[in-house]
């Protein structure tokens, strides 16, 4: 009951005029970055993260900052469907499946119906996962309080192994990106010995690379450089959306409650794993097609083909926050950026957050409920506006985004050195995207690398250098074995494919 008392106080805090205004601002900005394919969720949140920097000194404090940031996250989740349906350009990787039936519906003059179905499915999926967070997060956090250094190292190891085992990029490239992130995380002062590492005489590097500067360059600037090179352009995109269309679509959606439920369950299950939203959207689409009455009509403008992937993707996007809040392990790239934002404010996501910052964490959960409702209303009301915005040439929009990146990097420490670092990271991000090196494991290693190293070294100090400490207890052994299986899996399947291919050639 104590948790619900804090949740009620969280609702009261989030509904103050100041915080409600931040909620509207965050949702609008989030939809904007979700709409633009040159940005997307993690990229846009990274660029807008400086808006919350220093907000802890303002009247609303850290709670207002997290409300703004979580609403940017929620708006970015909603925004990706707009370009997918109107322009056949996925705003997010998980919106690809939405184009299969969403764009045909728009071509048939049913864009309003498709958008309403997508936004409503997104709302239901996210609400389902937020309810899971409400009831499961305290239980998981209390269990995790008993973790020692070996168990935390096992959790970190399993997380990085998940990226290696489930990444769409080749295993070698995922491993290389992860190792590069660990190298970046090692820069600065060693937290165990106090010695300086890889600073090369630069005093500004004693504290290591600033997370905010790095992600603005890697995600924001890198994506913009690639989009400018590819000559991104928007075509099409007329949408009429009024209350009559909204209510008619809602009435029709009641007949597809099984599709909604399947999307919620698939998304919640897949969301806690890295990259789960992408897999969840395709899996939900495939299940809806397999269980539908007319599977041969999927791809021609079936509303179930819009409901299923959007519900699953947003259920996964919301449930990705569950391991971040309870264990300090993000389940998606955007959740990793949010994790960095919390750490930037001096908060440490994980089991101690629920014990030491109850008002804050329940205020965050309350803002999830409210921002989901406000987000649905905002996107339904502003679709024509964003559709018109996308008719502006991308060459006009891109310079404004670059200026925002530069300003965001400079305001972190009011230093031109950070701007140059951001530009360097932007080039690195561009090269990674160009060469198909995943940025998510690199970013995660940059954020958690030092913590994983600390857990590893503390474990060895306690065991006098014996690696068996990571297999001495059932929990630690289970985590390590699961991680080793995930790392070995793509290697085994790769060799099997080569062997089958060789036999086929003969």
Image (cartoon, rainbow, N blue to C red):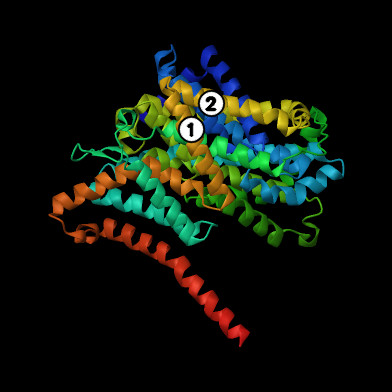
For this orientation, the residue located farthest to the left is 464
Residue at x 67% of width, y 42% of height = 229
- Residue 388 visible in image: yes
Q: Where is residue 179 in the image (x, y as percent from the top left)?
A: 39, 52
Residue at x 46% of width, y 18% of height = 13
In this view, the residue in front, 371 or 95, is 95
In this view, the residue in front, 271 or 80, is 80
Quadrant of the rendered structure where residue 447 is?
Answer: top left
For this orientation, the residue located farthest to the right is 108
Point out the tag, 1 or 2, that comes first from the N-terminus: 2
Looking at the rendered structure, the number of numbered marks drawn on it comes to 2
Q: Position of residue 239 (x, y in %)?
A: 81, 33
Query: Cα distance, mark 1 to mark 2?
Result: 8 Å
Tell me the tag on residue 422.
1
Quadrant of the rendered structure where residue 497 is?
Answer: bottom right
User: Which residue is disc 2 drawn over?
Assistant: 406
Q: What secondary structure is found at the residue carrying circle 1?
A: helix
Residue at x 72% of width, y 32% of height = 395
Q: Is residue 71 above or below residue 429?
A: above
Q: In this view, does 444 lie above or below 501?
A: above
Quadrant where the C terminus is found in the figure: bottom right
Q: In this view, does 267 lie above or below 324?
A: below
Marks 1 and 2: CB-CB under 8 Å? yes
Q: Where is residue 237 in the image (x, y as percent from the top left)?
A: 81, 36
For this orientation, the residue located farthest to the bottom is 506
Mark 2 nearby-residue class (10 Å; few <14, some 14–19, many ≥20): many
Tell me the tag on residue 348.
none
């Amino acid at each position: 009951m104590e948790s619900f008392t804090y949740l009620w106080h969280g609702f009261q805090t989030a509904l103050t005029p100041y915080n409600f205004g931040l909620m509207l601002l965050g949702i609008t900005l989030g939809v904007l970055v979700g709409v633009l394919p040159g940005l997307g969720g993690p990229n846009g949140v990274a660029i807008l993260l400086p808006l919350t920097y220093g907000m802890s000194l303002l009247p609303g404090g850290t709670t207002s900052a997290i409300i703004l940031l979580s609403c940017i996250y929620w708006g970015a989740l909603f925004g990706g469907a707009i370009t997918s349906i109107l322009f056949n350009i996925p705003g997010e990787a998980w919106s690809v499946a939405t184009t299969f039936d969403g764009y045909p519906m728009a071509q048939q003059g049913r864009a309003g119906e498709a958008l309403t179905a997508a936004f409503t499915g997104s709302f239901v999926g996210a609400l389902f996962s937020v309810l899971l967070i409400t009831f499961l997060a305290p239980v998981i956090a209390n269990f995790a309080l008993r973790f020692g250094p070996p168990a935390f190292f096992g959790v970190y190891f399993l997380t990085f192994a998940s990226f290696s085992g489930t990444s769409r990029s080749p295993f070698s490239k995922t491993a290389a990106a992860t190792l590069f992130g660990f190298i970046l995380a090692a820069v600065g002062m060693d937290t165990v010995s106090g010695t300086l590492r890889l600073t090369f005489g630069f005093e500004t590097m004693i504290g290591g690379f600033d997370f905010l500067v790095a992600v603005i360059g890697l995600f924001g600037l890198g994506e913009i450089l690639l989009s400018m090179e590819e000559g991104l352009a928007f075509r099409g995109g007329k949408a009429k959306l009024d209350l009559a269309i909204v209510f008619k679509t809602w009435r029709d959606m009641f007949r597809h409650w099984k599709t909604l439920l399947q999307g919620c369950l698939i998304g919640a299950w897949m969301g806690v794993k890295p990259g789960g939203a992408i897999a969840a959207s395709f899996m939900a689409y495939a299940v809806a097609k397999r269980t539908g009455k007319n599977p041969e009509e999927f791809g021609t403008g079936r509303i179930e083909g819009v409901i299923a992937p959007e519900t699953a993707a947003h259920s996964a996007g919301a449930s990705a926050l569950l391991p971040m809040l309870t264990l300090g392990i993000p389940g998606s790239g955007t959740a990793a950026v949010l994790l960095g934002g919390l750490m930037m404010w001096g908060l440490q996501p994980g089991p101690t957050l629920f014990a030491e910052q109850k008002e804050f964490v329940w205020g965050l959960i309350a803002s999830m409920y409210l921002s989901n409702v406000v987000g649905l209303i905002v996107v339904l009301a502003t679709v024509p506006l964003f559709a018109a915005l996308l008719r502006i040439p991308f060459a006009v929009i891109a310079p404004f985004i670059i200026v925002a990146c530069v300003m965001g990097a400079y305001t972190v420490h009011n230093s031109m050195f950070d701007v140059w670092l951001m530009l360097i990271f932007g080039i690195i991000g561009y090269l990674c995207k160009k060469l198909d090196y995943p940025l998510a494991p690199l970013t995660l290693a940059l954020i958690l690398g030092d913590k994983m190293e600390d857990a590893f070294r503390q474990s060895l100090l306690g065991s006098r250098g014996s690696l068996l400490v990571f297999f001495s207890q059932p929990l630690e052994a289970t985590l390590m074995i699961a991680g080793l299986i995930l790392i070995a899996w793509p290697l085994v399947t790769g060799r099997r494919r080569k062997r089958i291919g060789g036999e086929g050639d003969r």
